[in-house]
Amino acid sequence: MEFNYDVIVIGAGHAGCEAAAAAARLGSRTCLITMDMNKIAQMSCNPAIGGIAKGQIVREIDALGGWTGLVTDRTAIQFRLLNRSKGPAMWSPRAQCDRNKFIWAWREVLENTPNLHIWQDTVRQLLVEDGEVRGVQTVWGVTFHARCVVLTAGTFLNGLMHVGRVMLPGGRMAEPASYELTESIARHGITFGRMKTGTPVRIDGRSVHYEDMEAQDGECDFHKFSFLDTGTRHLRQLPCWSCFTNEASHEVLRRGLPESPLFNGQIQSIGPRYCPSIETKIVTFPDKPQHQLFLEPEGESTQEYYLNGFSSSLPMDIQIEALKQIPAFRDLVIYRPGYAIEYDYFDPTQLKHSLESKKVRNLFFAGQVNGTTGYEEAAGQGIVAGINAHINCHGGEPFTLGRDEAYIGVLIDDLVTKGVDEPYRMFTSRAEYRILLRMDDADMRLTERSWKLGLAQEDRYALLVSKREAIARLVDFARSYSIKPALINPVLEQLGTTPLRQGCKLIDLLNRPQVTLAGMAEHIPAFKRELDRLTERKEEIIEAAEILIKYEGYIERERMIADKLARLEAIKIKGRFDYGSLQSLSTEARQKLSKIDPETIAQASRIPGVSPSDINVLLVLCGR
């Protein structure tokens, strides 16, 4: 049997769902191939979306017209805004979700997306002719012809799970691995390697002594993931719980180290540095008497809980015995042990910034197959790959995001320029322009670009326009309105800030950390009337305006730096030089530049091993 499509997406994880939805909504006939339609957008590890820098990525996906933010808002059972004590560049939304409702919400989206079909099967072979992808073949003998293919296979490529010395093939617990596909791709000159990740034990909540834990409640203010009006929280909100390991549990864990796949040579691949297993923690930090654990609900009505901080591949009896040394888990009952999984990934330096392969035309890679870790990083790559697959089918310039435009831009540039030697996780510290990449302004940065593509719909664009106008009115009012000392000094003294000696503009007063827009409106009738004009999204608009006012100097300075560096982005060098013959470059620079063949001088400057003097040589050769 044969079928014909514009775009085939392999794998229905977070990258695959965003890629398929984007390509189809843009107008490409799209087929999403998945092993199990009941595991679409499965959260293989913690059923949570967001976190430090990851929450900003989800807001960017939403601003582009993606679905992860909307599905999260619909299925959240706890929402928190992290890093509130820091500046707005560090604020990051995070939501605990109902695992099963998240799957079905995504499935409802996909099944009702025009131009999108779903096929349950396993892809075994990539079809390539003359260096260009032509489609795929499945284990059921079905051939799908396509103009573009997006690979988002997650941890399923030759997946191997570990619990102690027990090794089982699989892409996730109780799910089969995918075989032959890696080799089918590698025969076209695309190199691959092995990585490792892991997941903790799942606990029966009925066996937990919550009186020995500290409750961590969520927040119920106006913050959400989607810029669209998603209303109030749809599901019952639940607390998370925290406790600590102790020396008795550490002693049990140490006793199990000879049986640990991480330390007995059974696992050779590299795991995520910033999400280490509990056995790695006790070895890396031998003097630390305890490690914090978070017990997080898997759903609104299930008793299943996820133990954040206790990822492990130790033998299951060691896992259980160690946990029983912790007072809250003294009567522990589990659903399944933690386990590690090894899987194939492909070197992302073999990709363009559009996520298209440099070796095989119209073949795109997104998600963990690029060496990343995290649902959010995967979804961000997925939407970019889906957009560009559609563009390759129907014409147009590649859609790419700069490092000063989005965390997704930072993520992709890091992958294709620097590559990975461990699973890549996004942090705010990876972005040199993080003041420009705040969670509050993702729609300001990206929605208009997506709207021009045709992905962001009219309702989203109309919300952007109205929000932009409302923010501008508030900022203009603050710039022009004069404050008299007699009116405001009693309020300033009450706030603990210096009284005015002479009049000033309201914007100057708002630059003080103690002074807020909402607080001033209580004492300035004209300003209150201005705020009362905001009938929709009031809190969101006030917050965005206040950030622009208070951080104006920092934002402008960072924008100036970004604009200066953008000049190097304009100098195109791809295909201009035979780097191997340029003896004025260092040996390492010749090797790295030949391998990556950067698009611009700016990208070349970010390649590890390419020094400023090497960049100066290239600038001279470009006549600069």
Image (tube, rainbow, N blue to C red):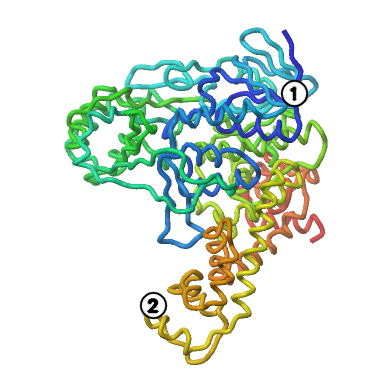
Picture layout, residue 393 above or below residue 443? above
* Residue 69 left/right relative to 331: right
The residue type indicated by label 2 comes to Leu
Frontmost residue, 108 versus 566: 108
Mark closest to the chain's N terminus, 2 or 1: 1
Residue 339 position within the rendered picture, expressed as x and y whole percent measured from the top left? 37, 25
Residue drawn at the location 55% of the way across and 42% of the way down: 69
At label 1, counting other C-alpha atoms closer than 10 Å, the crowd grade (few under 14, some 14-19, many 20 or more) is many
Indicate which disc residue 303 carries.
Answer: none
Indicate which disc residue 133 carries.
Answer: 1
Residue drawn at the location 64% of the way across and 69% of the way down: 473
Residue 130 position within the rendered picture, expressed as x and y whole percent measured from the top left? 80, 22
> Which quarter of the rendered picture does the N terminus lie within?
top right
Q: How many marks?
A: 2
Frontmost residue, 183 versus 75: 75
* Residue 249 left/right relative to 616: left
Picture layout, residue 509 above or below residue 19? below
- Callout 1: helix, strand or loop? strand
In this rendering, does residue 87 appear at all? Answer: yes
> Which quarter of the rendered picture does the C terminus lie within?
bottom right
In this rendering, does residue 432 appear at all? Answer: no
The residue type indicated by label 1 comes to Val
Picture layout, residue 514 above or below residue 246? below
Q: Which tag is nearer the camera, tag 2 or tag 1?
A: 2
**Residue at which label 2 appears:** 495
- Callout 2: helix, strand or loop? helix
Residue drawn at the location 49% of the way across and 30% of the way down: 195
